Image: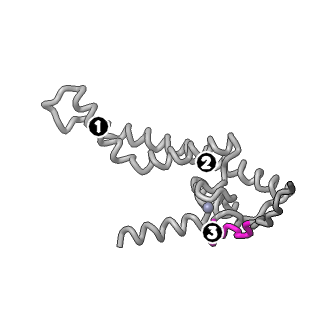
Amino acid sequence: MPAKKKNNSKSSSKRQTTKKGAKKGRCKKTSKNQLSEREQKIQEIKKTLIEQREKLLQEAESALNTLPEESAFPDMGDQASAEVDRNFMLRLRGREQKLLKKIELAIEKIDNGTYGICEVCGCEIGIKRLEARPVTTMCIECKTEQEEEEKLLEA
Ligand SMILES: [Zn+2]
């Protein structure tokens, strides 16, 4: 008894609609030649970052040395005043400390080969942007988007 041929092959030709404005693929692939040029520039950036780190550390040290020796809180014990000085330093150098961390992170990324890749979309960050702002972790498009979102949140 032959089975009734059921022509029920409704091949679901409904294609899943791809999201418009997906962040993938807006970056162009760089050729090998460009890559080595890019790598060279990244090595130059690394040198700059190391110099910058040295400078920051030296500045932090000299700032420490120029702190007034006389304690503003004579009633407190040495330990307490040292604690006050340390907190003061931390607040004073907060910006530098943040920058220092960013610099160290960037150097680390250069060493493990993940430097210059946008943390948001995974595209390469333009070398000019990296040269201008070596500690950046976002491509200009993502940074602009983020800033716009922040503006919206603040409004
Ligand atoms: Zn990006």
Per the image, label 2 sits on a secondary structure element best described as: helix
Q: CA distance from mark 3 to mark 1?
A: 55 Å
Residue depicted at x 53% and y 48%: 102
Tag 1: amino acid = Asp
Of 12 and 3, the residue lying toward us: 3
Tag 3: amino acid = Lys
Residue with the mark numbered 3: 19
- Magenta stretch, residue numbers: 12-22
Classed neighbour count for the residue bearing mark 1: other residues with Cα under 10 Å, few (<14), some (14–19), many (≥20): some
Is 93 magenta? The answer is no
Q: Is mark 3 within 8 Å of ligand 1?
A: no
Nearest-to-viewer mark from 2 and 3:
3
Residue with the mark numbered 1: 85
Q: Is residue 106 left or right of residue 10?
A: left
* Quadrant (top left/top right/bottom left/bottom right) for the N terminus: bottom right
In the rendered structure, which disc, 3 or 1, sits on the residue that comes first in sequence? 3
Tell me the quarter of the picture where residue 76 sits.
top left
Q: Is residue 131 left or right of residue 70?
A: right
Q: CA distance from mark 2 to mark 1?
A: 29 Å
